[in-house]
């Protein structure tokens, strides 16, 4: 009984991090919840080691990342095929363009709304752009590591991340936001 | 592992993304994990669960079996050093053919006597060496087993 309570406390401490990593990588809330559940079931099997470990957070993050990438593997062959066939102008028709931009000036955005707008932009990026972008900016992986993990070329990783950044910036601008301005505002 | 950050990698966007708090996990997550854990425990064979969850009959049998094993080991180790028992066994050798039980007991008692004789002649340093070797061997086996498990079984 005590063990279960300790595991609950452990889960409460890490559930946002695990779920957040999954949702950003998968871009899908239901799938992210399934992955998060699987991660915590695995953590429960090793709770004896993890409960006192200083590296439990790192272990959870790595397992989450690997499970998400395994989950995406079945789509990856298709993903590679279509991106290899993609023409240079294809990124113009991005799914973010269909999102209704709120009619708000930068001053009227509160912090939470700004964060939601960025998260929405991330989740609406195509898998091709979102996955390497998240691995680079959130997971601290190098371009080389990302290329190896995704089984694609280094140049493709760089191109996809670059396009992802451009698409995300475009999305932010449609909400009248610029990363530079948001950072300055957050620091005030 | 971590890439050195380059200015051309859009530092403002990088910082903005890094400063985002993780999205909150839905409240259903905790409940679904707890339900899955309960289901997993319920579907697990009783002998794979902790002993406290075993049926009473199985626990009783296990305790009795362990007591019997412990008693037999103590009895057999005593047999080697007990002169009366040794005398009886020896008498059995002279007067009548040995049963398989007596033969086994005699062999064990001979091993016990020999082990005691050797132990009394060895210096203490040897025992330390034997103990440390055993610990190192155990640690080595444990490490190798763990490596094999993580390398080939548990890839996550």
Image: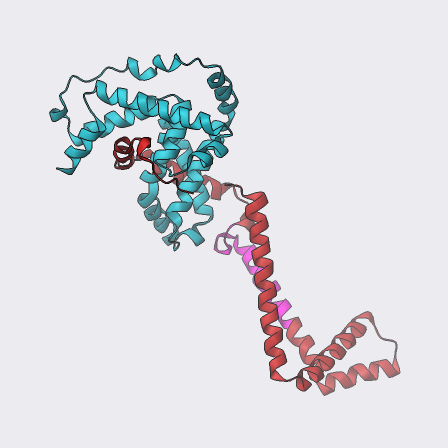
Chain colours: A cyan, B red
Name the main secondary structure of what is drawn in magenta. helix
**Residue B127 in picture, x, y percent from top left:** 61, 78
**In the displayed structure, does residue B131 sit left or right of residue B18?**
right
Residue A160, image x, y percentages: 40, 24
- Residue B48: image location, x then y, percent: 54, 49
Q: Which quadrant of the structure image shows residue B63?
A: bottom right
Residue sitting nearer the eye, A155 or B78: A155
Left/right of residue A84 with respect to residue A187 in the rendered view = right
Front residue of this view, candidates B81 and A139: A139
Segment tinted magenta in the rendering? B49-71
- Whether residue A35 is visible here, answered yes or no, is yes
Q: Is residue B61 magenta?
A: yes
In the displayed structure, does residue B60 sit left or right of residue A108? Answer: right
Q: Is residue A31 visible?
A: no
How many numbered marks have been drawn onto this rendered protein structure?
Answer: 0
Q: Could you say which is closer to the camera, residue B40 or residue A82?
A: A82
| Quadrant placement of the C terminus of chain A | top left
Q: Quadrant of residue A175?
A: top left
Q: Residue at x 59, y 49 (%)?
A: B148
Q: Is residue A18 above or below residue A179?
A: below
Residue A164 higher or lower than B5, as above or below:
above
> Residue A159 appears at what percent x and percent y?
41, 24
Location of residue A31 with respect to B137 vertically, above or below = above
* Magenta stretch contains residue A127: no
- The residue lying at 27 percent from left, 31 percent from top is B13
Q: Nearer the viewer, residue A156 or B90?
A: A156
Q: Quadrant of residue A174?
A: top left
């Amino acid at each position: 009984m005590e063990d279960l309570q300790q595991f609950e406390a452990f889960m409460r401490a890490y559930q946002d991090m695990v779920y957040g990593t999954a949702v950003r990588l998968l871009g899908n809330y239901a799938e992210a919840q399934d992955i998060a559940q699987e991660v915590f079931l695995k953590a429960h099997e090793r709770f004896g080691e993890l409960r006192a470990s200083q590296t439990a957070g790192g272990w959870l993050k790595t397992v989450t990342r690997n499970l998400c990438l395994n989950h995406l593997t079945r789509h990856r062959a298709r993903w590679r095929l279509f991106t290899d066939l993609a023409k240079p102008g294809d990124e113009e028709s991005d799914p973010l363009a269909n999102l209704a931009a709120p009619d708000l000036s930068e001053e009227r955005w509160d912090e939470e709304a700004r964060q939601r707008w960025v998260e929405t932009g991330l989740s609406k990026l195509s898998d091709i752009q979102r996955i390497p972008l998240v691995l680079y900016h959130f997971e601290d992986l190098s371009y080389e590591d990302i290329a190896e993990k995704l089984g694609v070329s280094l140049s493709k990783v760089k191109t996809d991340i670059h396009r992802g950044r451009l698409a995300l910036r475009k999305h932010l601008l449609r909400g009248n936001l610029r990363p530079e301005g948001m950072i300055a505002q957050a620091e005030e | 592992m971590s890439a050195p950050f380059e200015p051309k990698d859009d530092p403002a966007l990088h910082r903005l993304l890094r400063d985002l708090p993780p999205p909150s996990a839905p409240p259903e997550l905790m409940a679904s994990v707890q339900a899955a854990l309960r289901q997993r425990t319920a579907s697990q064979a009783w002998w794979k669960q902790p002993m406290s969850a075993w049926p009473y009959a199985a626990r009783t049998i296990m305790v009795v079996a362990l007591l019997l094993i412990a008693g037999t080991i103590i009895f057999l180790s005593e047999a080697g050093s007990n002169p009366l028992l040794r005398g009886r066994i020896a008498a059995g050798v002279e007067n009548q053919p040995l049963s398989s039980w007596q033969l086994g007991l005699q062999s064990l008692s001979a091993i016990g006597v020999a082990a005691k004789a050797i132990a009394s002649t060895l210096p203490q340093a040897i025992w330390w060496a034997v103990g440390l070797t055993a610990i190192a061997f155990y640690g080595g086996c444990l490490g190798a087993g763990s490596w094999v498990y993580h390398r080939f079984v548990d890839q996550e």
